[in-house]
Image (tube, rainbow, N blue to C red):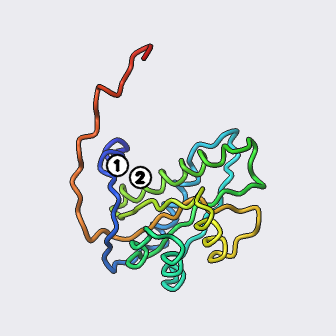
Amino acid sequence: MDTIKSIIERRSIRKYTNKEISELELNKLLEAAMYAPSGGNAQPWDFVVIRDKEKLLRITDVHPYSHPLKEANLAIVVCGNMKKEKFPGLWIQDCSAATQNILLAATDLGIGSVWLGIYPEEDRVNGLKDIIEAPDHIIPFSVVSLGYPDEKKKTPERFSQMNVHMEKW
């Protein structure tokens, strides 16, 4: 699949089959995440892969909209690592780019995904820190729920020339 097609066809998939995501596919997703752009090439991220069903269910206790994890094959927790941060606050954009790369790579691989926001919701951040046993310098940013899709969603038309301004507002 080409890049633009992956961008346009990416949908938030919340229902999954029982088909397992292979280690090779998981590594491709993680590699895509690590090739995201970052300010000053700081790469201020770390990733926690969760396959354990009990841990996935524990996340649903701290995140009210994380029900896709009940069926997910695995999840990737994208974390900001404050020890790697070069420019204060920029880690948020960097981790956003890494999260988006996982979603696009999943689409390309035929894997369903949905971005579950953690940061800046303090109760979610603290709950995830406990679940993944993160040290103080690690801030859980997002959880990407992953599995082979058990639903098909249409691609809506989102392009609107009305949102484009040339040279000035």
* Identity of the residue drawn at 66% across and 48% down: 91
Question: Residue 6's mark?
Answer: 1
Residue 165's x, y, as percent?
Answer: 38, 20
Element type at mark 2: helix
Q: Nearer the viewer, residue 54 or 8?
A: 54
Element type at mark 1: helix
Question: Residue 101's mark?
Answer: none
Residue found at the far bottom of this picture: 54
Residue 104 versus residue 123 in the image, above or below: above
Q: Nearer the viewer, residue 25 or 59?
A: 59
- The residue labelled by disc 2 is 104
Amino acid beneath label 1: Ser
Residue 140's x, y, as percent?
Answer: 62, 63
How far apart, in angstroms, are the residues tagged by discs 2 and 1?
6 Å
Residue 76's x, y, as percent?
Answer: 53, 67
* Identity of the residue drawn at 44% across and 13% down: 167
Which image quadrant is residue 22 in? bottom left
> Callout 2 environment at 10 Å: few (<14), some (14 to 19), or many (20+)?
many
Mark before the other along the chain sequence, 2 or 1: 1
> Callout 1 environment at 10 Å: few (<14), some (14 to 19), or many (20+)?
some
* Identity of the residue drawn at 39% across and 63% down: 113
Residue 131's x, y, as percent?
Answer: 62, 77
Residue found at the far top of this picture: 167
Judged left or right of residue 49, residue 135 is right
Residue 159 versus residue 16 in the image, above or below: above
